[in-house]
Image (cartoon, rainbow, N blue to C red):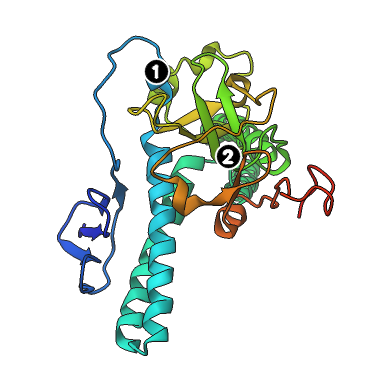
Amino acid sequence: MKEMHIFFGVERLYLSSHGRKTLSFVGQSNISRPGNVRVEAGWLFKGGDKGSELDASCERSESANEDILMFFFQLDLATRVQYALNVEQYDIAQQLRNKLTEVESEVIKLQENRRGSASKSEVQDMAISLLRLRADLQNAIQSENYNLAAELRDEISKLEAESLAVSVKAQAYENVQYAFRLGQKVKHKIFGYRAVICGMDPVCFESKSWMETANIEKLARGPDQPFYQVLVDVHEDPNLLVAYVPEENLLAPDQQDMDRFDHPYISFLFYGADAAGDLIPIKPLREKYNQPRHELPHDPQNEEDGKDV
């Protein structure tokens, strides 16, 4: 497996994987030849460990942070492609396009790994496998091969149970209703910190070990509820930064939150704040989660409060 390192003009912001290739954007662009890559994103800022006690750090998410940074890398590469075209550097633009294609492919893989079996394609694949197994079972019965028939029955029962679980998860993904929206300022019900929604999943897509650490099984709604990627105000918890929080642990503020909110990722995920103090997500972020633009206009005489604009 080859390696690709991507360094941007931001101190300690990097993208790395295990291997040998390097792509640098500090100063002159140094574009390596395309290759197969497996990407890992590192934290921009690292804080000290808080220990093993259950506190806000239990919801800290490496995979959510990786997802956000990969999104940023896509945006940055797309911008650099456009700039190279504008200044007629077509060879560089083509090389940047190739790298952008690699990153986009890796993003799809990461999303599939996070979402597991929640895709329609896997439901369809299981349905096809069941049809084949049932046909094999019928042939085994007709040929009086009862040992094989018994094995096929067990395999069919197991696959049917898996298919049901996958179908439920896929249905949840299609029909989920989110209580919060992108850019909305929220407060953690238990830990009390202020945060901003920057991503959302229909169910928990974290690993089993993460769910055990975060005590997800003790939640009233368990893992099968919407989970949100949230940016945590650095003034309230500088070591947390990105958390993955179940819907039942979040609260919308009773009043408009006009207080200052600081986070190193804000500038590339949001345009700015609306009249209610919530942040306005950039168009690519809204498209990523298929969410409409929602903002309270600064001139309420021209727009009704709370309507999409």
- Residue 143 can be seen, yes or no: no
Badge 2 is on which residue? 200
Give the mark count.
2
Q: Is residue 20 left or right of residue 60?
A: left
Asked whether 211 or 288 is in front, the reply is 288
Depicted 65 relative to depicted 254: above or below: below
Badge 1 is on which residue? 213
| Image coords of residue 172 (percent x, y) | 68, 36
Count residues near mark 2 (Cα–Cα under 10 Å), then give few for <14, some for 14-19, many for 20+.
many
Count residues near mark 1 (Cα–Cα under 10 Å), then give few for <14, some for 14-19, many for 20+.
some
Residue 80: which quarter of the image? bottom left
Disc number lying in front (2 or 1): 2
Of callouts 2 and 1, the N-terminal one? 2
Depicted 260 relative to depicted 55: above or below: below
Mark 2 belongs to which amino acid? Answer: Met
Q: Residue furthest left?
A: 20
